[in-house]
Image: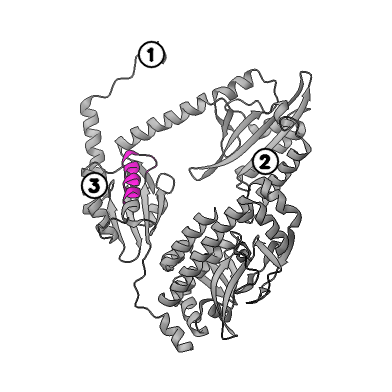
Amino acid sequence: MNPLLPPPPAPRPADLASEEIAFRDWVRRVVKGAAELQAFEAGEIDAVIDPATGSAVLLPGAQAALLSSSRLALSALEALPGELCVLNASGTVVMTNRAWRASVATRAGGGPGIREGGDFIAACREASAPERVHAEAFATGLQNVLAGGREVFRRECVCRSAGGRYAFTLTIAGVAHDGAVLAVVTRETVSERKRAGGPRRSGRARASRIAALARAGTPNRLLAALPAKDYEQLLPGLEPIKLTYGEVLYEPGEQMQYVYFPNNCLVSLLTVVEGHRALEVGLVGREGMIGSRLALGITASPVRALVQGTGSAVRMKSARFLQAFRHSPALQRVLFRFTDALMLQVTQTAACNRFHVVESRLARWLLMTRERVPSGEFYLTHEFLADMLGVRRVGVTSAASALQRQKLIRYRRGVITILDQQGLEAAACSCYRHVQIMGLEAAT
Amino acid sequence: MASKRTKASAPGVPIATVVVMRLYVAGAAPNSIKAITNLRAICRRYLKDCYKLEIVDVCEHPRRALDDGVLVTPSLAKVSPAPISNVIGNLSDTRSVLAALGVPAIEIE
């Protein structure tokens, strides 16, 4: 405060009282419902939406509480040891924290050293060697983030200067605020040791690390749940394969030559009745495997395993898999849990087929499919769905039409698109929740 | 065979429905925080997994609240199953929340 100026007059209690009365009158004019007014009088309201401006007006109590939590958040950012600045939609620095300002004052470690009010993009474009290449990339990355093209841009840079070699990571993350996208920029110094990946590893340790990386990258959740050491044992026997819609992996009674781990394909387990009619009893996607019966010591398949969603998988010879299974307690644990989840799914499906209406079952089936493949769109004919649900074709047609009328799905030329996941969940029978929760719990 | 299948899947058996709700709040304002806490406790105790809850922050999406006819927060809207209903305030009165949701006050073990 300027000491030469007199302090502003403190608001008199009478002014505050009249302001509050005017505000309360305004609220009573805007809010007309009895329940709303009752909650307002009881002090249970935080905000009123002003229909004239379309914005939320906070009540004084809520405003004070939010202001206090904003102050806390700002203090926390200020005290953060990492360097951080916030840019507005045009790339101007609107906020920096203490660590950023300190780093700018003694800038020796590289990266854009821009103060509040500075233009980040212009500073990057004007950067001189040795940082020019990186600075250009920062500017492009920032423009991408601000335009909503990507959520996060991250780049690790190594530069040489007269003072020696230095490395840092710059991360730019987009944040939605008041209808615009802001960018939060953080700069982290990378030590030489971290860059080298820590202490030197032995050949064996390096192989484990590679296996861990490969395991982390596999979309199949059953394989991803294995410890790196156990996954490493399986890795040489795993063979990538494409499974195509309509392909039969096993017929009932047939020896299972391979086990399959779906990545993004979907396999139905069908019980064949009277040699021709088939009814789906289970559905396996990236959360599990086909051929888990081997774990119980049975080498013949009891069901028909039919690919109903084209995609990739990995497969392994059954004999080799059994060998690995015998020697890996972790694989046994994971597999028993999956088998249990599958049994739960089969029993729930059996009850569902008997008790629930076709529409709910179709909704449940679509949701289960959605859960197991990364897309919300599947190619499925009415005949196929009729077989899956064990009903006549006409039953599927009317159930699909009902879901379509409610705008939950779109069905066009055999392609089903889920439009409203939440609505479909509400339309599905309770079995979906049981299978979903049990399945997920057991598979993770 | 076919007629049997159709009969087997005929309606008549009660199906547990999922209660879909939307809670409109104003950021981390005190009543909004209370409403979220109270509602989560009610859902845990009386609805177990049979619910879907969406929380809409009117400070970020005021237009959404206006379009849904919501003028004050916290405000809970039951979206489905019909009939739709609303509860205004911090949801500390469990009985009125359950009545609005159409859920009997029987705890789920």
Q: Look at 43% across and 73% down and name the residue there.
A: A351
- In this orientation, which residue lies closer to the viewer: A94 or A414? A414
Q: Residue B36: horizontal and vertical position, in percent?
A: 35, 46
Query: Can you identify the residue that label 2 sits on?
Result: A141
| Residue B71 is at least partly visible in this image | no
Dot 2: within a 10 Å radius of its alpha carbon, few (fewer than 14), some, or many (20 or more) residues?
many
- Asked if residue A159 lies in the magenta stretch, the reply is no
- Specify which label sits upstream in the sequence, 2 or 3: 3
Q: Residue A147: horizontal and vertical position, in percent?
A: 61, 46
Q: Is residue A155 left or right of residue B37?
A: right
Q: Residue A135: horizontal and vertical position, in percent?
A: 72, 33
Q: Secondary structure at mark 3?
A: helix
Label 1 amino acid? Leu
Query: Can you identify the residue that label 1 sits on?
Result: A5
Chain to which mark 1 belongs: A
- Please tell me in which quadrant of the rendered image residue A191 appears: top right
Q: Marks 2/1: CA distance? A: 47 Å
Label 3 amino acid? Ala
Q: Secondary structure at mark 2?
A: helix
Query: Can you identify the residue that label 3 sits on?
Result: A39
**Residue situated furthest top in the rendering:** A4
Per the rendered image, the range of residues in magenta is B26-42
Dot 3: within a 10 Å radius of its alpha carbon, few (fewer than 14), some, or many (20 or more) residues?
some
